[in-house]
Image (cartoon, rainbow, N blue to C red):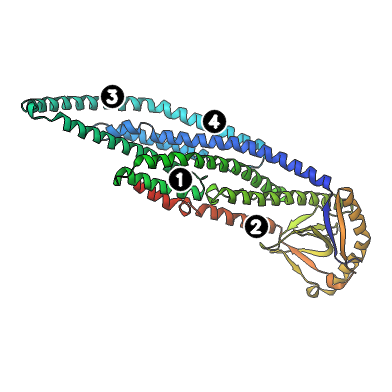
């Protein structure tokens, strides 16, 4: 019985447990290092914001002043240069090794520290120029104000007996209350904008905040309704939303670690590493969506870990019997399971090992060749001498297969028999493989996800509400 041999491949429980323990330990290390890297990335982004806003309030008052054109140009160029350096430093291609991730964190921290030090060192003389100009403008303004008050005082003193203090006081007090409400409203709208801008906010929370923002605006600027009630509604809602954001951020770190670990397993035998492109935060509309994705990813990662172990053990066993280490091939992007080719020394035939997603393992003798695409040539399309040679190989494989099964069992891989086929010319197939096909197909799959990430901007989920909120603030 030397035609295709199909078995159910099953890892011993203790081996499964050990592989999962190793995987979890790697997850822990990757999560720990990516958390540090994310914290450093946030710190760098904060520094970019600080540089962008630096002296904005002061320079705004003097920007149009005579003689300040060159100073403002110098400030703009300095800001642009430093922000550009920090933005470039954020373009990190995150590696899969915890030690390499840690090195990225240290490098980003070093660059950020140096750029910030450079900015504040060079901005000092610019600050002094702005401060001097601001003082001059302030002095001029005071002189003008004093002059106007003095002129107005002469006129009002003549009619002081006609001034109604009670009415004016009420008007001033009412005006102050209105101004205070508007300032509070602007503050709340700014906080809501910041929350809505978060990639970690859920769609349901975003809708709640948008409704609150509309209410805040109406009660503060358009109607006589109670602004206090609207403000209280925001204060009650805000803690729940910030808590959800924190939960999402923490869970995303787990998701990211799972993704890195999974792609590391996919890349373990790839000649060209596949890009790491986990879904961005804004791709998930809720915590439940993220949890579901992470659960599926964990299952895939666990299965990939076991498959990697099986492949490595197959390689060890095949070497014992004079075959090369198995190389994986992919026939198309819609393939399921994994195909491995273990060539013998002659290079004319090989053992084709197919491991399905349902853990069925098939072994068969096939002819091998190289071409511009990976494909299977059926027996009917082969020359007669090729079919005869493969038929002889099938007979020889009859004695070898039980030895392979026994060696795999020693490595905790149990093959439970499903079917055994007799040698037959109809099983004499040939596999033409394209050595770069595996990486080409897998990278196509990953790049599709990458391109979708790049094109799917936040506008799809929150852009419309953000634009509405900006309109309210204006």
Give the distance between the C-alpha atoms of the residues marked 1 and 3, in whole angstroms. 39 Å
- Tell which tag, 1 or 3, sits nearer the viewer: 1
Q: Do the residues labelled 1 and 2 touch (CB within 8 Å)?
A: no
Which image quadrant is residue 226 in? top left
Q: Residue 335 location, x and y as percent?
A: 70, 62
Name above or below for residue 2 compared with residue 151: below
Depth check, front residue: 147 or 239 = 239
Q: In this view, does 6 lie to the left or right of 45?
A: right
Above or below 286: residue 52: above
Q: Of 283 and 407, which appears nearest the observer?
A: 283
Disc 3 target residue: 132
Q: Quadrant of residue 165?
A: top left
Identify which residue is drawn at 75% across, 64% down: 432
Whether residue 270 is visible, yes or no, is no
- Asked if disc 2 and disc 4 are in contact, CB closer than 8 Å, the reply is no
Dividing the picture into quarters, in which one does residue 323 lie?
bottom right
Which label's residue is closer to the chain start, 2 or 4? 4
Residue in the foreground of this view, choosing between 392 and 443: 443
Name the mark on residue 110: 4
- CB under 8 Å between callouts 3 and 2? no
Q: Badge 4, how many Cα within 10 Å: few under 14, some, many 20+?
A: few
The answer to whether residue 211 of the structure is visible from this angle is: yes
Q: Residue furthest left?
A: 158
Q: Residue at horizontal 77%, vertical 52%?
A: 307
Q: Which residue is drawn at 20% across and 25% down?
A: 142
Q: Which x, y percent locates residue 365?
A: 85, 64
Q: Name the residue under label 2.
A: 440
Instruction: Specify the farthest residue to the right.
Output: 399
Q: Find disc 1 in the rendering and name its residue.
A: 196
Quadrant in the picture for the N terminus: bottom right
């Amino acid at each position: 019985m030397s035609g295709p041999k199909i078995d159910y491949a099953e890892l011993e429980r203790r081996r499964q447990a050990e592989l999962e323990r190793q995987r979890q330990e790697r997850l822990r290390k990757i999560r720990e290092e990516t958390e540090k890297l994310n914290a450093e990335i946030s710190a760098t982004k904060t520094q970019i914001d600080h540089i962008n806003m630096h002296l904005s309030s002061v320079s705004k008052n003097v920007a149009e002043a005579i003689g300040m054109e060159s100073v403002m140009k110098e400030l703009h160029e300095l800001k642009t240069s430093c922000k550009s350096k920090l933005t470039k430093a954020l373009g990190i291609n995150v590696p899969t090794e915890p030690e390499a991730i840690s090195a990225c964190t240290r490098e980003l921290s070093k660059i950020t520290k140096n750029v910030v030090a450079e900015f504040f060192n060079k901005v000092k003389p610019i600050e002094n120029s702005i401060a001097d100009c601001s003082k001059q403008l302030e002095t001029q303004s005071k002189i003008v104000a004093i002059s106007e008050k003095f002129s107005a005082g002469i006129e009002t003193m003549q009619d002081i007996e006609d001034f109604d203090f009670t009415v004016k006081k009420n008007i001033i007090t009412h005006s102050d209350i209105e101004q205070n409400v508007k300032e509070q409203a602007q503050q709340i709208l700014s906080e809501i904008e910041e929350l809505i801008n978060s990639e970690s906010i859920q769609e349901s929370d975003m809708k709640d905040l948008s409704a609150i923002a509309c209410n805040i605006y109406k009660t503060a600027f358009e109607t006589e309704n109670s602004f206090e009630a609207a403000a209280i509604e925001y204060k009650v809602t805000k803690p729940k939303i910030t808590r959800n954001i924190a939960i999402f951020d923490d869970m995303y770190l787990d998701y990211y670690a799972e993704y890195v670990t999974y792609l590391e397993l996919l890349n373990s035998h790839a000649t060209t590493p596949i890009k790491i492109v986990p879904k961005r935060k804004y791709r998930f509309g809720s915590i439940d969506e993220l949890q579901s994705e992470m659960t599926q990813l964990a299952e895939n990662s666990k299965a990939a870990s076991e498959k990697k172990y099986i492949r490595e053990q197959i390689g060890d066993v095949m070497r014992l019997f004079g075959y090369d280490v198995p190389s994986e091939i992919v026939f198309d992007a819609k393939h399921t399971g994994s195909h491995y080719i273990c060539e013998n020394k002659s290079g004319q035939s090989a053992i084709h090992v197919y491991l399905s997603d349902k853990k069925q393992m098939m072994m068969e003798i096939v002819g091998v060749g190289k071409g511009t695409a990976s494909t299977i040539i059926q027996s009917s399309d082969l020359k007669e001498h090729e079919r005869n040679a493969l038929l002889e190989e099938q007979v020889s494989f009859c004695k070898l297969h039980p030895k392979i099964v026994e060696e795999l069992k020693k490595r905790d891989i149990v093959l439970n028999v499903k079917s055994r086929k007799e040698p037959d010319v109809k099983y004499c197939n040939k596999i033409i493989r394209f050595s770069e096909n595996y990486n080409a197909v897998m990278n196509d799959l990953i790049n599709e996800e990458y391109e979708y990430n790049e094109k799917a901007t936040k506008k799809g989920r929150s852009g419309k509400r953000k634009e509405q909120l900006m309109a309210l603030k204006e």
